[in-house]
Amino acid sequence: MNFKLGKNTQIPLYILILGMLVYTLIILTSTDIFETRDIFFGTTAKLMIDGNDISFNEYSITDNRQGSIIEGIVLIPFFLLFGDHGILLKFVNLPILLLFFILVYYFMNTNFGYKSAVISLLLFIFAPVTFLRWSLVVNTHVFHSTIYLLAIFIIFQKLIFNREIPHFMLFGFISGLFITLNYVSLIGVMSCFFVLIIKRRRLFNLKNLSLFLILFLLGISPLIHFELTSHRITRYVNRWFIEDTSFEVSNYFISALIKVKKILFENFLNSFQFGYFSEFNYIYYILSIIALIYLLKNNLSKFKVASTLILTSFVLHILFFILSNFPLFYSGPLDQIHDINYFMPLILFSLLSIAVLISRMKNKLFILFIFIFISMGVTNIVSLVSFEKIDYDQFYAPYCYQDYGINLRYRFEVFFPDTSGRYVPEKICNKLNKEIKDDCIRGTNVEIIPIIGINRCNYD
């Protein structure tokens, strides 16, 4: 007999409130969620509030996505309402988290049932340290990619898969826009087309593809403009996918096998970081593998579009790591600061799969696993909480124009060492308002450092 979880609409609401309280507690009591590069988003917000005469592209703090500007825009009302306080850099992620929870609940409830939806919310609240920490780091664009992926899956089902007359033009525009905001969205779009090819092949024709491409190009046009005016995307792609002095065609197959081993049996295992008990990694890891196999087995016997999207995206992410030159492939735990966040989409797919698996368990087993996961989650939350008084000004400077100058120099001189790019940073600084221009120029004269964004500013 299955454990009955009645369809009480208040239960998800209570869980959402609990989730917001848990993450607020972590924000107010933890220094582990501090990331130096968060300051860039506060600086972006201040530059917009001050009304500086710079272009949209010049607000961008990264070379691999335009969605980084959105975090700065979201911060603007927080700064206007509450003043320039660094702690607000963390609170801005709360509405983003709320959107994530709503998308998770809707996706799971629509495709796997109410019980799976409620369990998935609990798993993301009482989550591994990886998720708890990186979902509150503003700079973690890979967490934000999980939101785009879920949104693409939902929109695909609404506009294409579940309709007699699919809206390929609208889906094309949304796909292009999401890829502009976050490149990882491309994997979600590819997964959607894979579903069409294997299940609704009649829709995969020249007419529908043409309709898709028409507005896809419109949606991705900001990204095209960004590339034509800066060429930084080409440099980024070349850096991570083409340049590799150790690459040899004859050894490629062996190299790929080594990467697969390290990704699946080392990095993926270590990505489920836990506070006090590292042994919990294995519980999540083993259950993730079992849950993904369970989805695959069920999908082979009875096709389910949501399961196929999850499984296909999981595989495509693995392929992405294999084909790229990202420095993730070594033994031992991932670097807590800069490497582990790239596994956030895999953690998303794993926890969703685990939620489905637990929801199908019998009564006593169901209760046991819910208890185990909540208990592990509580230990993770406690491991992040600090009961010492935190000097927020020390950890959370709200903005820094000098770091903006450093970032400009890094973006243009590193990616354009032999061109006029080395003169661009100071030209951009000269466009800024007089009172902040000198700080920016001072940053362009600082030597390049390995980790940009280290706080050297403290604005009261």
Image (cartoon, helix red, strand yellow):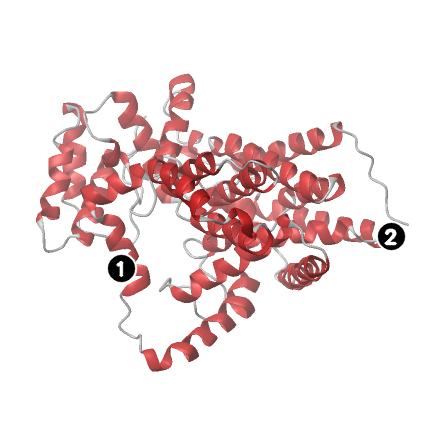
**Residue at far bottom of view:** 250
Image height of 141 relative to 368, above or below:
above
Q: Nearer the viewer, residue 152 or 391?
A: 152
> Disc 1, disc 2: CB below 8 Å?
no
Marks counted in the figure total 2
Q: Quadrant of the C terminus?
A: top left
Q: Is residue 144 visible?
A: yes
Q: Position of residue 117 (x, y in %)?
A: 70, 41
Mark nearer the N terminus (1 vs 2) = 1
> What is the number of the mark on residue 364?
2
Tag 2: residue type? Lys
Q: Position of residue 76 (x, y in %)?
A: 37, 24
Tag 1: residue type? Asn
The residues tagged by marks 1 and 2 sit, at their Cα atoms, a distance apart of 53 Å
What is the secondary structure assignment of the residue under circle 2?
helix
Q: Residue at x 51, y 44 (%)?
A: 149
What is the secondary structure assignment of the residue under circle 1?
helix
Q: Position of residue 49 (x, y in %)?
A: 30, 21
Q: Residue at x 32, y 48 (%)?
A: 64
Image height of 150 relative to 279, above or below:
above
Residue 50 horizontal side relative to residue 387, left or right: left
* Residue at mark 1: 238
**Residue at far right of view:** 1
Residue 328 horizontal side relative to residue 29, left or right: left
Image height of 300 relative to 248, above or below:
above
